[in-house]
Image (cartoon, grey):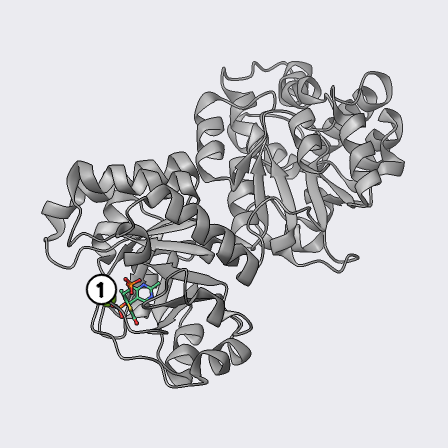
Amino acid sequence: MKAEDLRLYAITDCAHYTGQALIDRTKALLEGGITMLQFRDKTRGREAARPDAEALLALCRAYRVPFVINDDVELAREIGADGVHLGQDDAALRLARMKLGPDKVIGISAHNLAEAQEAQAGGATYLGCGAVFPSQSKDAACLAPGVLKEITDTIDLPVVAIGGITGDNLDQLAGLGCDGAAVISALYGAGDPLAATKALRAQAEAIFGPYGAGKPQALIIPLDRVLCDTHAAWAALAETYLTGVGKAAGPDLAAILRQRTLAASAAYIKHNYSVPDGISQILYEFDYDLEDYYRRQARLQPGAQAFLDQCRTAGIPVIALSDASSDLAGLLADCTGCADALAGIISTADGHLDRTEPALYRQALADIEADPNQVWVVEDHIDGLRTAHRAGFTTLAIPAEGQDDHEWSRLQAEADQVVESLAALKDLVK
Ligand SMILES: Cc1ncc(COP(=O)(O)OP(=O)(O)O)c(N)n1
Ligand SMILES: Cc1nc(C(=O)O)sc1CCOP(=O)(O)O
Ligand SMILES: [Mg+2]
């Protein structure tokens, strides 16, 4: 979840809408541009509410909007929601974090600086602060004057304001440091929910800042398979090696190794096939084959040159990510003619970091002043996408050779945005 997801945060009004009526009304809100949804049902029990929660989750996935559950950590976990929102009298943050894991969203209600500090220290993802105005939906005390600004000035978490917010008073939140507005009645109670949502979304963007597809400050993208057509060389490495030592590769070896670094692939071969060489000799053979392919055959993928040219025109530094050593990756960039278009290369081989390590992606920003939120990581690899997401980057999924359907559907479901090709990516950075 990014701070901008809080721009226009709808909370369901299950006192007035359940079942199909709730789904239809929420669909209008999603169509109109809400940027996050919370399922809040204060009367029905978990089992009665579950079908609505599951249907709304599916709807939010289709609109690529985060979906959290109010109060019920178990329900959130069971249906695979993006997280929960908890108040001061709900489940303890520490327990919720233990149950949901480090990647899920946990929003915490804070009514003063001490509660906000405790939530930050306990690993909250964002704060909900209110009531900022008297609410028709809940009997909630209004925040003391100055408290909201004190929280946003002091705390490092994204903050969403809540309570009695309408199109008529939203402007009063300008300059208070919030990232967005959470709303029940002004959206669910509107005569024309689609029009009301569109109007509030435009107003929220004007007050809290734009949402989505601004240009990135930098972009990280795989060199192999995505920018260059090197899939065949990578897929053949292990089999070529095994044939050379008189062994037959298993049928799904290439798929197994696709998720691994070169060093991890060499270790896999050593441990699963009875081969005469040690891991460093196997790695040497891999490097030899890659170098040969890079020098003789490697080409840029269709659309790569135009994409890199567009990034240069737009002043967006492009950092290439490679699973080969940076020497080999540099050779590939030279041989395919894209070296001058790259601001840098990071290598999983050099730092002994694989794509499950957030430090890998952070390393890419070592020479660039950039906020990870404003840096796009383009990934064809599910582990990489998840890690970049955890490290706070904006993630884009892209198809590449060697992905199976399962991995591609996971990438599509989990990425902030999906691009079907380098041409589509080029259009996004225009
Ligand atoms: C975004 C957001 N902020 C605050 C709340 C209130 O949570 P809580 O204090 O637990 O009250 P209930 O919503 O459970 O009545 C919220 N739900 N969402
Ligand atoms: C759920 C909730 N929590 C609040 C708080 O102050 O913590 S106010 C509130 C209700 C928000 O609904 P409406 O937009 O209709 O006022
Ligand atoms: Mg609660």
Where's the C terminus, which quadrant? top right
Q: Nearer the viewer, residue 14 or 366?
A: 14
Asked if ligand 2 lies within 8 A of label 1, the reply is yes
Q: Which quarter of the picture shows residue 235?
A: top right
- Please indicate, yes or no, whether residue 190 appears anywhere in the rendered image: yes
Residue hosting label 1: 137
- The percent coordinates of residue 328 (x first, y second) are 81, 34
Q: Secondary structure at mark 1?
A: loop
- Give the amino acid at mark 1: Ser
Image coords of residue 213 (percent x, y): 61, 44
Q: Position of residue 221 (x, y in %)?
A: 69, 38
Tag count in the figure?
1
Left or right position of 224 against 87? right
Looking at the picture, tell me which residue is in the foreground, 141 or 121. Answer: 141
Location of residue 338 with respect to 133 vertically, above or below? above
Give the x, y percent position of residue 319.
Answer: 75, 43
Vertical position of residue 231 compared to residue 308: above or below: above
**At x 40% / y 38%, what residue is drawn?**
31
Residue 124 visible in image:
no
Residue at 18% x, 47% y is 17
Q: Quadrant of ligand 2?
A: bottom left
Q: Nearer the viewer, residue 417 or 211?
A: 211
Please tell me in which quadrant of the rendered image residue 111 appears. Answer: bottom left
Where 34 falls versus 92 (above or below)? Answer: above
* Residue at (46% x, 85% y) in the render: 146
> Residue 222 vs residue 305: left or right?
left
- Could you tell whether 301 is left or right of 409 in the image? right
Q: Image check: 315 left or right of 51?
A: right
